[in-house]
Amino acid sequence: MVVLKGGLSSGYKNYVADKGLNDETYTADCVALIRISGTSVHNNKAVQVDAVATSLNSNECFLLQSGSSMFTWHGNQSTFDQQQLAAKVAEFLKPGVAVKHAKEGTESSAFWFALGGKQSYTSKKVAQETVRDPHLFMFSFNKGKFEVEEVYNFSQDDLLTEDILILDTHAELFIWVGQSVDPKEKQNVFEIGQKYIEMAAALEGLSPSVPLYKVTEGNEPCFFTTFFSWDPAKATAHGNSFQKKVMQLFGAGHTVENQDKSNGSNQGGPTQRASALAALSSAFKPSSGTRSAFPRPSSIGQGSQRAAAVAALSSVLTAEKKRSPEASPVRSTRSPTGEATSPAETKSENTFSEVEDSKEASEVKETEVVEPVSESNGEDSGPKQEVEQDENGSESSRSTFSYEQLRAHSDNPVTGIDFKRREAYLADEEFQAIMGMAKEAFYKLPKWKQDMHKRKVDLF
């Protein structure tokens, strides 16, 4: 962030004229001294100060602009990050200019002349406000009570277009509003932010006068995106969360195809299901054009793509089931070998039976024989594992795997398991060591607390 003196608005110009004040507005050829301060990329800033030698400080870096010349001054106790930022600001203010470098104690006479002469300055470190890590929160109203849930290890992918989220940096508060949020909820954004401030002020010592910003999806400013590993391509993607995920999995072509079929950005349950079926059918369709048989996948990528398509379809069906409890129940089926089919396969097969169009039905019928299992070198990676529920309500698996294999970001991930129940495949002793409690105690916790513990250990 670069803050310069003065202003360009007519209101500022009129104010200066009425009060008879000197107009200190920054120009490209004026004498300007700019202080570079901060401790990290999250709080670095450049602020124009009075162009006199007494403004210097040994703990900081400064830029001195004098006509067409540009000097950088590095205090003896300045940091490398500050020196880098000084070079970037110099390039921003005067692109292509030849910058003259001056380390404290080696200044030229031209440098002091631009500041009106050499004078003493301080070397005391300016007290910095305590820097705290930013936190991202989801919120809900439980029986009229405002409650928040933190999103740990957050990233840009956690900003779902259907949600409103709160980013607390302690110095500022941002309310991020997705494009697909209900218009009635959008009207209450600042009221939500104020409720959070009141709660955080009592619990975390947040200042009641903290600046509150409303940030809409697609219009995120740089001082908001700096808290994320921001990818502009993701920010410009259109559609709901499902369509964006399809685009990441299969490319932009599938997203365009799905949008053409949807006739609108706000998708209902049946339309979302149709989009999922189209993506799934395309994932299973052979490149040769022969529809009587499917070639076995030759790489992990193709198997993973199919598994991802089935998982995406499964999530749509789960959401539909929650919205429509009166719908007919899904019957589970067993394969001829006696192995239990996975939830994703069961849901996808039952979905196929609902398709009335003869063409879609024939395509779906072909895909039922292919199991979404990742393969390597033409061999199956391993049998699927089934998670069972014991009498106490806790979950156990027929086979166990190591923590390193079950982690969400594992270098050697296990396949053929229920990825929503990664922790269930840990041995009892390892579960106790990782989670800090026994399985029975863990599954007695509320669902949101289970998810919180799993996020902390990368099992979510």
Image: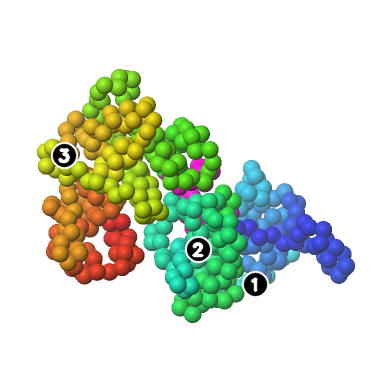
Report the Cα–Cα distance between label 2 and label 3: 46 Å
Amino acid marked by disc 1: Ser
Viewer-nearest of discs 2 and 1 = 2
Decide if residue 6 is on the left or right side of residue 92: right
Q: Examine the rendered structure and indicate whether residue 201 appears above or below residue 318.
A: below
Disc 3: which residue: 335
User: Which span of residues is magenta-colored?
Assistant: 221-242
- Label 2: state its secondary structure: strand
Q: Examine the rendered structure and indicate whether residue 29 appears above or below residue 175.
A: above
Disc 2: which residue: 166
Image quadrant of residue 37? bottom right
Disc 1: which residue: 120
Residue 229 inside the magenta-drawn segment: yes
Amino acid marked by disc 2: Ile
Image quarter (top left, top right, bottom left or bottom right) of the C terminus: bottom left
Residue displayed at 53% across by 51% down: 180
Residue displayed at 53% across by 38% down: 263
Q: Nearer the viewer, residue 252 or 361?
A: 361
Amino acid marked by disc 3: Ser
- Label 3: state its secondary structure: loop
Decide if residue 215 is on the left or right side of residue 32: left
Image quarter (top left, top right, bottom left or bottom right) of the N terminus: bottom right
Report the Cα–Cα distance between label 3 and label 1: 85 Å
Image quadrant of residue 185? bottom right
Viewer-nearest of discs 3 and 1 = 3
Ranked by sequence position, the earlier of labels 3 and 1 is 1
Residue count near mark 3 (Cα–Cα under 10 Å), binned few <14, some 14–19, many ≥20: few
Residue displayed at 47% across by 46% down: 268
Percent across and percent down for residue 352 are 32, 37
Percent across and percent down for residue 305 are 32, 37
Viewer-nearest of discs 2 and 3 = 3
